[in-house]
Image (spheres, rainbow, N blue to C red):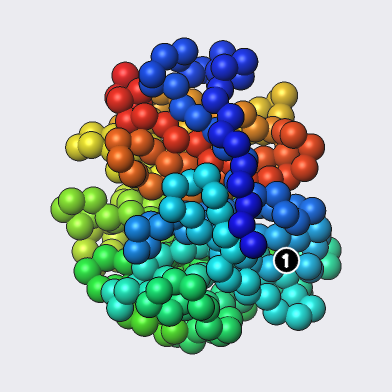
Amino acid sequence: MKHLFLTLTLIGLSLIAGFAQDDETPTVTKIWDEAPHNAFPDMIRFRGMFYVSVREGNNHMPDNSGRIRIIRSKDGEEWESVGLLEKEGMDVREARLSVTPEGKIMVLTAVGIYDQGYKELYPMVAFSDEEGVNYSSLQRPELTMEPGLDWIWSLTWHKGIGYGVMYTIKEEGWETHLLSTRDGLRFETVSQIETAGNPNESTLRFDENDQLYVLVRRETADKMGVLAKSEYPYTNWNYTKLPVRLGGPNFLFFGKNNLLIGTRDYRDTGAKTVLHRTDRDGNIEKTIEFPSGGDTSYPGMLYHKNNLWLVYYSSHEEKTSLYLSKIPLKSLRK
């Protein structure tokens, strides 16, 4: 089944979003709204196609109805469903996509049962075939740590090794650990990332010198995000406190000196999805606000043909849906 949505050029909304009225104006498209609640997307390029993961459910939480749908498109306008991952009686939550060294899509997600707190929570993975159209059943990877309420929130491959940050929910305080894998089915512990403040959702990237950057959301204390950095073998960490809270954080390197950080912006008037251009220490130089509100954020990001493609979810049009924005790179350099 294919779904076609019209691109919405930001004219009336552009002043609110801070976009210029010229050829550098981003566009925004609603790309998916099939379920009652469509959220937590991620996006990759694979075999010349755009792939997006979306959690379909009844609401944000508590909700044990969640399942992961994989959709794809040639042009970002017409989308088709190619995969559906679910586990009976359990909530399959935010999925993160990556391409394995063997040339398959890896879907990393978390599966849990929530009832006034998680009763069960653990990572699960699935893999596509080489064409990206058939997917294996979800399976639980092996961890070298004692299992608990665990969530490997994202995964980045670097020189044949996949790295992810797992957060573990404990009564005495949440913990984050850097894990590594060669096949996506067995994860080994590399080091602990000690930020305090109940750290959780974390995205990691490697720079041109193999230095590892990790963007960490924190849930308690001052709740400000943290940018952690480490050099190989990634066992010693330096930490920089950010001036903002994070929600569903993602980022890419932008040139030699900058980061592009997509996140939820917390404010008294309600949450927004925003993009921060920062220096490599996380100091904010520019912010773009997207049409968004209510339940929103969790952007997936990639570069394609002189644009930053950014997919996020939002409930500003009542129904929680997925939106795709294309932002000209030249507008981000200003």
Relative vertical location of residue 305 with respect to residue 243 in this rendering, above or below? below
| Residue 314 visible in the snapshot | yes
Residue drawn at the location 27% of the way across and 65% of the way down: 158
User: Which class describes the residues within 10 Å of circle 1: few (<14), some (14-19), or many (20+)?
Assistant: many
Between 9 and 283, the one nearer to me in the picture: 9
In the figure, residue 5 lies in which quadrant?
top right
Left or right: where does residue 136 sit relative to residue 214? Answer: right
The location of residue 274, given as percent across then percent down, is: 53, 32
| Residue 202 visible in the snapshot | no
Q: Provide the residue designation for mark 1.
A: 66
Residue drawn at the location 44% of the way across and 21% of the way down: 25
The location of residue 333, given as percent across then percent down, is: 30, 24
Mark 1 lies on a secondary structure that is loop
Residue drawn at the location 57% of the way across and 59% of the way down: 80
The location of residue 162, given as percent across then percent down, is: 34, 71
- The total number of labels drawn is 1
As drawn, the residue found furthest toward the left would be 209
The location of residue 308, given as percent across then percent down, is: 38, 38
In the figure, residue 64 lies in which quadrant?
bottom right
Left or right: where does residue 273 sit relative to residue 293? Answer: left
The quarter of the rendered structure image containing the N terminus is bottom right
Between 179 and 19, the one nearer to me in the picture: 19
Left or right: where does residue 79 sit relative to residue 88? Answer: left
Give the residue type at disc 1. Gly
Between 42 and 115, the one nearer to me in the picture: 42
The quarter of the rendered structure image containing the C terminus is top left
